Image: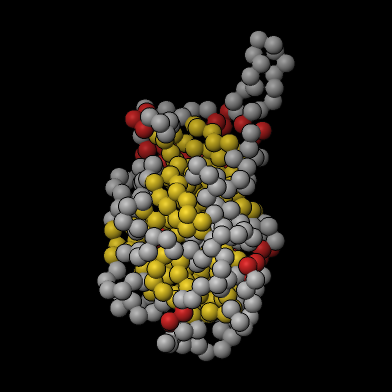
Amino acid sequence: MASFRQAYLLKKRIAGSILKQQGIHGIGVGLRDPKHPKKGAAIIVYADALATTGRTRKNKKNRRPPVPRYLKSRSGVPFRVVRSARFCKKGTNGSSFTRRIRPVIAGYSVGTPEGSGTAGLIVSNDGCGGSRLILSNNHVLVDNNTRRYSPTIQPGGADGGTVPRDQIGQLDRFVRLSKRKANYLDAATSKPLRRSLLKPAYAVFGTVPGYVKAYKIGDRFKKVGRTTGVVTGTVESIHTDVQVDYGGYGNLGTITFKDQSIIRGRRPVSLEGDSGSVWLTRKGNYAAAVNFAGSDNGMLSIAYPVDLFMRVFGTHVAKPGTHRVRRGATGKYACIHPLSPKLISRLRPIKAVPHKSIRSRD
């Protein structure tokens, strides 16, 4: 039986070569058999059906095609293949949670005149929690991955929002996505025109008291997204390296993300317009992970730990009174663990170019 440590170390060693194989979309660490956790860990490979069948043999005695060499057990660690179409960002179109709402709370449509995503969370970047910002994705709030001025409207442009009628703020900071280097988060914040335009609350579930620093394989989450509405999902794999198709956005095409989490739903959990939505713990409503992409059918959510966002942006959950940070899951390899301070410093957010000076005021 393979340990999570063995699976994690093997994944780190082979991820680069596996992702170069045609039809492979991601590789991470998960359970060998989700129905029987005691069977240990495995390398989880997300792939097209054709990518894992190999060439059909003409020998009638062996009608099954051979398993590709790169998917055979190594060092005692088994591989589990999850059939999946490509992963892509989830930034426009849809129908739920698209109405205009004031003050704005997490879970509703937000974006630019060009498209819509989801306001994932209301966060603060000062100790007393007086400031309020919208947490969402780069491709939801940013103008084509650049520092150019970008108005934030609610609802987003795909839902009929326009400037100036529906403008609630403007892009504040973001992490630029890279075409050549590995990415770790698709993230941005928006600063409101007035503090009172944002309310520290989450649609349907109410107050978010804080966030967890770690979670583990098998944890069950819930969230509200602009398109799929209220959904639940289970963490299927962690430390997963994936390739995500951004199409023409920022002229990025397909780019690589490292150390992501794959969260599976029983029905679609990440459709167009759900980008930026934040997964909460099933109990306690603590923020856990930020959704930014998914499989073509929406059954898989690609998300990164919300703790990474908070550390990179120097923020915390905005709420009346004190904010809380929970340690969450324990276990060095069966659950996510923080990136190094050196890497965090490399992910320093970029300040957007303001259209004009605005101050958060009531």
Residue that lies at the very extreme toward the top in this rendered image: 61
Residue that lies at the very extreme toward the bottom in this rendered image: 357
Asked if 64 appears above or below 191 in the picture, the reply is above
Which corner quadrant of the image does residue 247 belong to? Answer: bottom right
User: Looking at the image, which is closer to me, 282 or 141?
Assistant: 282
User: Looking at the image, which is closer to me, 153 or 148?
Assistant: 153
Q: Does residue 256 appear in this view?
A: no
Q: Does residue 119 appear in this view?
A: yes
**What is the total number of numbered labels drawn onto the structure image?**
0
Residue 233, horizontal then vertical, whole percent: 45, 46
Asked if 100 appears above or below 289 in the picture, the reply is below
Asked if 5 appears above or below 311 in the picture, the reply is above
Which corner quadrant of the image does residue 50 belong to? Answer: top right
Residue that lies at the very extreme toward the right in this rendered image: 58
Which residue is painted at 39% across and 56% down in the image? Answer: 280
Is 159 left or right of 225, judged from the image as shown? right
User: Looking at the image, which is closer to me, 99 or 8?
Assistant: 99
Residue 53, horizontal then vertical, whole percent: 64, 28
* Placement of the N terminus among the 4 image quadrants: top left
Which corner quadrant of the image does residue 55 belong to? Answer: top right
Which residue is painted at 56% across and 60% down in the image? Answer: 96
Which residue is painted at 60% across and 70% down in the image? Answer: 156
Which residue is painted at 53% across and 79% down in the image? Answer: 168
Is 45 left or right of 38, judged from the image as shown? right
Residue 184, horizontal then vertical, whole percent: 49, 58
Residue 167, horizontal then vertical, whole percent: 57, 80
